[in-house]
Image: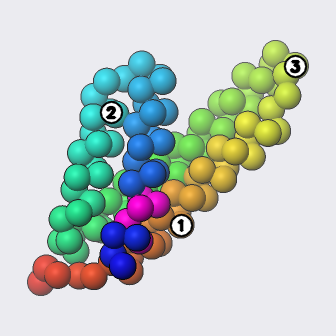
Amino acid sequence: MAILRAIPAVLCFLVLGAHFYRQGSVLLPAGCVAMIILLFIHDRRMIHILRGILVLAAIEWVFTTFNLMQERQAEHREWIRGAVILLVVAGFNLISAALLRRLPKTAEA
């Protein structure tokens, strides 16, 4: 059951890695893949760190949405659909962080 709760976080890290790769970074996508690997270490502290990273990723998606809106409005192009999609992605990151909270805690801290 814990693996099923981790699947949304895996998807979030993959999409975030693709986002960073599209922006021209190579290190950040590699870091996103590393986060997926760290996700399966059931240490309570690691889960808290990964939840924090997912929240920061949601903030990144909101900033990306804002930038997309500004660019498209300046070019007089349609921007609502892209903004809605990116805000749904941000929300999905927050939901994934909440689901990680319910993973079993195996480490004593």
Asked whether, in this view, residue 57 is left or right of residue 109, the answer is: right
Q: Residues within 10 Å of mark 1 (few under 14, many from 20)?
A: some
Q: Main secondary structure of the magenta part?
A: helix
Q: Amino acid at mark 3?
A: His
Q: Secondary structure at mark 3?
A: loop
For discs 1 and 3, the disc positioned in front in the rendered view: 1
**Looking at the image, is mark 3 or mark 2 earlier in the sequence?**
2
Tags 1 and 3 touching, CB below 8 Å: no
**Looking at the image, is mark 1 or mark 2 earlier in the sequence?**
2
Residue pointed to by mark 3: 76
Q: Quick check: can you spot residue 77?
A: yes
Q: Quick check: can you spot residue 109?
A: no
Residue pointed to by mark 1: 95
Q: Amino acid at mark 2?
A: Leu
Q: Residues within 10 Å of mark 3 (few under 14, many from 20)?
A: few
**Looking at the image, is mark 1 or mark 3 earlier in the sequence?**
3
Q: Foreground residue, 109 or 3? A: 3
Decide: is 4 above or below 106. Answer: above
Residue 56, percent across and down? 44, 51
Q: Secondary structure at mark 1?
A: helix
Magenta residue span: 5-9
Q: Residues within 10 Å of mark 2 (few under 14, many from 20)?
A: some
